[in-house]
Image (tube, grey):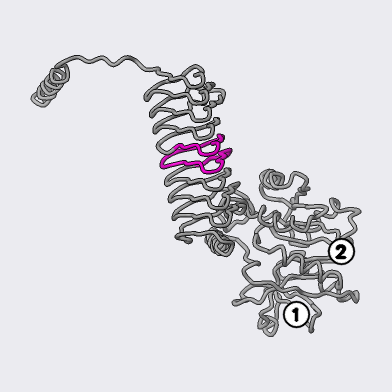
Amino acid sequence: MNTSLIILAAGMGTRMNSDLPKVLHPIAGDPMLVHAMAAGATLDPQHTVVVAGHGAAEVTAAAHAFDETATVVVQSEQLGTAHAVDQAKHALAGFDGTAIVLYGDTPFVEPHTLEDMLSAAEGADVVVLGFEAADPGRYGRLIMDGASLERIVEFKDATKDELAVTLCNSGVIACKSDLLFDLISAVDNTNASGEYYLTDIIGLARARGLKATAVTCAEAETLGVNSRAQLAQAEAAFQARARVKLMEDGVTLQAPETVFLARDTFIGRDAYIEPNVFFGTGVTVESGAHIRAFSHLEGCHISRGSVVGPYARLRPGAELQENTRVGNFVEIKNATLAEGAKVNHLSYVGDAFVGSKANIGAGTITCNYDGVMKHHTHIGANAFIGSNTMLVAPVQIGDGAMTGSGSVITSDVEENALALARAPQVEKPGMAQKLMDMLRAKKAKQQRGS
């Protein structure tokens, strides 16, 4: 079925008390808008139209960062949901298929639920996504007659009997695109809020003898975010589900409640994750890898058999091949560690290649930035870098080469060579005692003067 998405993302979100547009507040490392776009993207839509308003430039940038082909239209006045959807009319002109309306602040609708809606749309003109609410509160109610959806009643306009209904409206709608905009053209704002409600298209469709129905989903999928407290609840809900899913897939989380995951985190079967590990976006951990406690990972790839941490930081571009070791207080950025390489203690490796089975001693730094440009360091296979070595890039260390501890390496080292670059040690007999006596006398004089 030809499908297009209309994602409403124009709201200011005053209850967030933020300069950031509401839909750009992150859950699991990505803006809420991206979660909604990602769910819809599983349908392989022909068009994705994002309706922006407040902070339109920022919303546009976020939408294009996820899908550069998305169309962003601007709703200059927020006059209701029907008015918002109508802003997508010109972007979908000539589209012959089903449009699904999603919301940028409702990030958890599942792909299979959207597929259910498309299936229902094969036998109905308009399909609404509903849910049984534990506390219906101020939600709009779906008024059903068997499998037929008769109308949607907003809370402000509902009678006492209608408020007793627990089947509630999520706002998500599927409808043939041309019919959707035709129905919207007939919507008016004669209601308690003076807004153009998208929900009114159900009554209009029924008045024309068209068929409307509802598909239901779990209430958790319809969680909307309108405040910082709800944002925290949404984050907690995402993390709880993602942790359970990983464990079902064969990943060991030693203390699940302390591990924080991104929307796109991928961890393979039989990986072992210790407590207090944070995954930013863009992380892949292959099967059998071991991530030790208090490590922070983002934009990196960790191959099978590798051990990372504790207290390690892997930044974007870190590529760990099989059976590598990255130890405590080590930072890796935009660098590849070839198979079996080790960086075990207190080191920074950035903009570099470390060859297979090379050993990087404690306190080693690749000095990659000259204040203007970044430069590359190449460390060959089986090289041994002595502790506290400064590798001033651009520089190449040959296969099997060594550097002496405390060296500052500023030029290339050929393979199997030993490079030493430090001042000769000078020893002055008795000088330590003389110096201490002098300092103590100076301190005593200062104390007498005070």
Residue for point 47% across, 41% down: 325
> What type is the residue that disc 2 sits on?
Lys
Q: Nearer the viewer, residue 416 or 308?
A: 416
| Residue 19 visible to the viewer | no
Q: Is residue 48 left or right of residue 134?
A: right
Magenta stretch holds residue 142: no
Query: Residue 327: x, y in percent?
Result: 43, 42
For mark 2, give the secondary structure: strand
Residue on which disc 2 sits: 176
State yes or no: residue 334 in magenta.
yes
Q: Nearer the viewer, mark 1 or mark 2?
A: 2
Element assignment for label 1: strand
Mark 1–mark 2 distance (CA, rounded to whole Å): 22 Å
Q: Is residue 278 left or right of residue 423?
A: right
According to the image, label 1 marks what residue?
Answer: 143
Q: Which amino acid type is shown beneath numbered disc 1?
A: Ile
| Residue 179 found in image quarter | bottom right
Dividing the image into 4 quarters, which one contains the N terminus?
bottom right
Residue at (58, 44) in percent of width and height:
301
* Marker disc for residue 98: none
Left or right: 19, with 115 as reference point: left
